[in-house]
């Protein structure tokens, strides 16, 4: 029986890895340039972390988690995102006692049982970063400008940035009451998800994509217009910071985000090129999360972006990911003696950091030459018994077709020093 992939998963083959490496290297560079250290967190954690961290009223926790019991009867869940795990690690590893702020970045896979479509998968990748210990808007502006630098470094000159503030534990309860009042006589005509959220998380009614719900939300009061003084001052600080850095953005009052931990600033980078799943990157502040997971009262903010969506955006902009690395030397050999000789030089060159190729299938000279061409090698050398006994061989510079006779003894030195 042929085995196939589970729905929503994929293989990433070597020719595509060029793109992935390009993006991940650029992301790692942009983060390190801004003083972030890389963190790796487990693929699975105790289910309770996500119930409490992501929030048990969210779609992720209610419908999308891959949860299983291990052989010891513990409930574990494949991470549906990175923030909860990073916060757990911040608490677990005592990072609040380290010099603050603590700035971390990660490149992870994440798992959500979703309806699969373009840009939406069940196993996907996220590039993300988090800052702990800064309550001022400086951190909000820094993460957004980090993203701006990163996008520019991979050739994405402009991506729409939408921001909002969704308040804090001071202003949200009053606003939730206002929302419930507004939806009171509309909720019966809304979808089942909204009916459920009406009691548990009325803020999410605003961004429901169901047509009836969009219609019901037409005149909804926005939290952006109902912020407490502290949140309003914070939001003004974020906007001022972005203005002073000439970062273009739009305030989108209907961004509420799908995870429960957010407070104050939320933001998204969106594109029209990724189909209906246009949000490439989402993030925001989560000032109560560390404390609610058992840590100190430490503020946090961060973002993550879907690598697959980012690559789709780059493809649609026809961004050049560069070419695969060319082999410097292809050793074409005839006979066992020449093969053994070439294998030794090839191995030494690889040790010295030079990419070399050799045939492993015992193919004819013609087939080896064809392979060398296909691999786009810089130089080729043909070696047989004659070359070995006379200690000389002909190197072909493949781009020009030029040929040079060299002594076999000198090949290693010439290639390492690129003096062919
Ligand atoms: P999120 O909005 O759930 O936020 O996901 C962030 C990004 O991950 C999305 O904008 C999207 O690009 C990508 N993504 C999400 N689900 C899928 C999927 N099923 N298939 C493909 N890509 C997907 C978070 O995960 C938060 N942890 C972000 C954050 C970090 N907030 C603060 N710090």
Image (cartoon, rainbow, N blue to C red):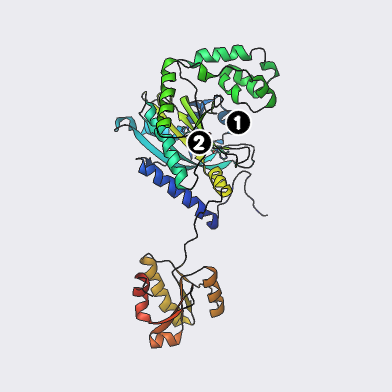
Foreground pick, 142 / 415: 142
Question: Where does label 1 land, which residue?
Answer: 63
Q: Is residue 302 above or below residue 311?
A: above
**1 or 2: tag closer to the N-terminus:** 1
Viewed as shown, does residue 155 lie left or right of 183? Answer: left
Identify the residue shown where x is 60% and y is 21%. 197
Q: Residue at x 52, y 19 (%)?
A: 223
Please name the residue that numbered disc 2 is placed on. 81
Q: Are there few (<14), some (14-19), or many (20+) residues within 10 Å of tag 2? A: many
Which percent across, then down, holds residue 336? Answer: 46, 81
* Numbered tag placed on residue 344 in the rendering: none
Q: Is residue 302 above or below residue 56?
A: below
Q: How many marks?
A: 2
- Residue 163: horizontal and vertical position, in percent? 50, 29
Q: For mark 2, give the secondary structure.
A: loop
Image coordinates of residue 329 in percent, x first then y, are 44, 71
Marks 2 and 1: in contact by CB < 8 Å?
no
Q: Position of residue 172 (x, y in %)?
A: 50, 17
- Quarter in which the C terminus is drawn: bottom left
């Amino acid at each position: 029986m042929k085995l196939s992939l589970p729905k929503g998963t994929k293989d990433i083959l070597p020719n595509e890895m060029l793109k992935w490496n390009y993006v991940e290297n650029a992301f790692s560079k942009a983060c390190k340039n801004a003083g972030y250290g890389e963190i790796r967190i487990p693929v699975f954690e105790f289910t309770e972390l996500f119930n409490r961290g992501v929030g048990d009223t969210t779609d992720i926790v209610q419908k999308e988690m891959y949860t299983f019991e291990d052989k010891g009867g513990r409930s574990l869940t494949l991470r549906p995102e990175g923030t909860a795990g990073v916060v757990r690690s911040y608490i677990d590893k005592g990072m609040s006692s380290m010099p603050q702020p603590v700035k971390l970045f990660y490149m992870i896979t994440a798992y959500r049982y979703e309806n699969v479509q373009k840009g939406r998968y069940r196993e996907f990748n996220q590039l993300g970063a988090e800052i702990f210990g800064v309550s001022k808007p400086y951190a909000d502006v820094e993460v957004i400008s980090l993203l701006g630098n990163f996008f520019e470094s991979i050739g994405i000159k402009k991506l729409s940035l939408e921001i909002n503030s969704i308040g804090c534990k001071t202003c949200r309860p009053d606003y939730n009451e206002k929302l419930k009042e507004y939806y009171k006589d509309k909720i019966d005509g809304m979808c089942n998800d909204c009916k459920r959220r009406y009691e548990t998380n009325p803020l999410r009614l605003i961004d429901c994509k169901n047509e009836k719900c969009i219609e019901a939300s037409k005149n909804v009061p926005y939290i952006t217009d109902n912020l407490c003084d502290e949140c309003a001052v914070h939001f003004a600080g974020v906007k001022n910071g972005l203005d002073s850095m000439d970062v273009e953005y739009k305030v989108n009052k209907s961004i509420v985000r799908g995870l429960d931990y957010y407070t104050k600033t939320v933001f998204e980078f969106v594109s029209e090129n990724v189909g209906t799943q246009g949000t490439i990157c989402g993030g925001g502040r989560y000032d109560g999360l560390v404390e609610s997971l058992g840590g100190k009262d430490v503020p946090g903010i961060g973002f993550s972006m879907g690598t697959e969506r980012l690559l789709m955006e780059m493809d649609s902009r026809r961004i050049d990911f560069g070419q695969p690395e060319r082999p410097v030397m292809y050793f074409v050999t005839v006979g066992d003696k020449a093969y053994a000789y070439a294998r030794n030089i090839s191995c030494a060159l690889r040790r010295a950091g030079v990419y070399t190729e050799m045939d492993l299938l015992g193919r004819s000279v013609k087939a080896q030459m064809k392979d060398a061409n296909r691999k786009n090698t810089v130089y080729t050398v043909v070696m047989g018994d004659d070359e070995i006994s006379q200690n000389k061989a002909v190197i072909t510079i493949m781009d020009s077709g030029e040929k040079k006779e060299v002594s076999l003894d000198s090949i290693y030195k010439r290639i390492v020093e690129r003096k062919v």
